[in-house]
Structure formats: C-alpha cells, structure tokens
Image (cartoon, helix red, strand yellow):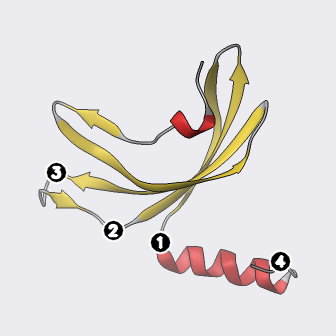
Amino acid sequence: MAEPGDLTVTYEEEGVVVVEELDKRILSKGAWTTILFKYRQWNRGKEEYGPVRYSIRRYQKTGDSYRQRAKFNISSNEQAAKIIQALKEWGVEA
C-alpha cells in the first residue's frame, strides 16, 4: 500500500534523472494529501541542473494508491519570497 512519504517528483528518462527531488514536506495527510517538493530539473542544452524550484501537489487516495489531482509550481525564489511575505502580512506565523 502506498504511503504519502512514498510520493516523489523524481523522474528518470533514458538513464538520466530529469527531475531530481531534493526534499519534501508533507503538509497534510488523509484522503487528500498535500506535499511541498523542492527539486531541480536537468537542462539538456547546458548538460547541468537548473536552479532549485518548488511545487505544491495535491493527491487523492483511491484504493491503495494516490493520484495527483492538482499542482502549483513556484517559478522562482522571488515568487516564493512574495508568497511568504503575503502569508506573513495575513497573520500566518512561522
């Protein structure tokens, strides 16, 4: 049976890890699970990994497996900082 901790964004193609998961945080568990992933993508042209990126993904548990139902990719550290700032302004404390 799959568990939220088993979910990953790591993706390999022709022996190359195209999306490398660096870390993750499980934000909620249950029939609907939300996970924040930290990852980087392989740039074929430069033959190197690009900058760190972030993705929030929602999964629905159906039977013994999880199906991704939604995702939001945070495109840059600047965008992540703006999200953090907005949450602080709205009264969310770390």
- CA distance separating discs 3 and 2: 14 Å
Dot 4: element: loop
Circle on res. 76: 1
Q: Which residue is mark 4?
A: 92
Dot 1: element: loop
- CA distance separating discs 3 and 1: 20 Å
Residue 56: give x, y in percent of width and height: 61, 53
Q: Residue visible at 65% across and 15% down?
A: 64
Vertical position of residue 68 compared to residue 34: above or below: above
- CA distance separating discs 4 and 3: 39 Å
- CA distance separating discs 2 and 1: 8 Å
Q: Nearer the viewer, mark 4 or mark 3?
A: 4
Q: Nearer the viewer, mark 4 or mark 2?
A: 4
- Label pair 3/1, CB-CB below 8 angstroms: no
- Label pair 4/1, CB-CB below 8 angstroms: no
3 or 1: tag closer to the N-terminus = 3
From the viewer's perspective, is 29 left or right of 19?
A: right
Residue type at tag 4: Val
- Label pair 2/1, CB-CB below 8 angstroms: yes
Residue type at tag 3: Arg
4 or 3: tag closer to the N-terminus = 3
Dot 2: element: loop
Q: Which residue is mark 2?
A: 51
- Label pair 4/3, CB-CB below 8 angstroms: no
- At label 4, counting other C-alpha atoms closer than 10 Å, the crowd grade (few under 14, some 14-19, many 20 or more) is few
From the viewer's perspective, is 8 left or right of 13?
A: right
Circle on res. 44: 3
- At label 3, counting other C-alpha atoms closer than 10 Å, the crowd grade (few under 14, some 14-19, many 20 or more) is few
4 or 1: tag closer to the N-terminus = 1
Dot 3: element: loop
Vertical position of residue 6 compared to residue 51: above or below: above
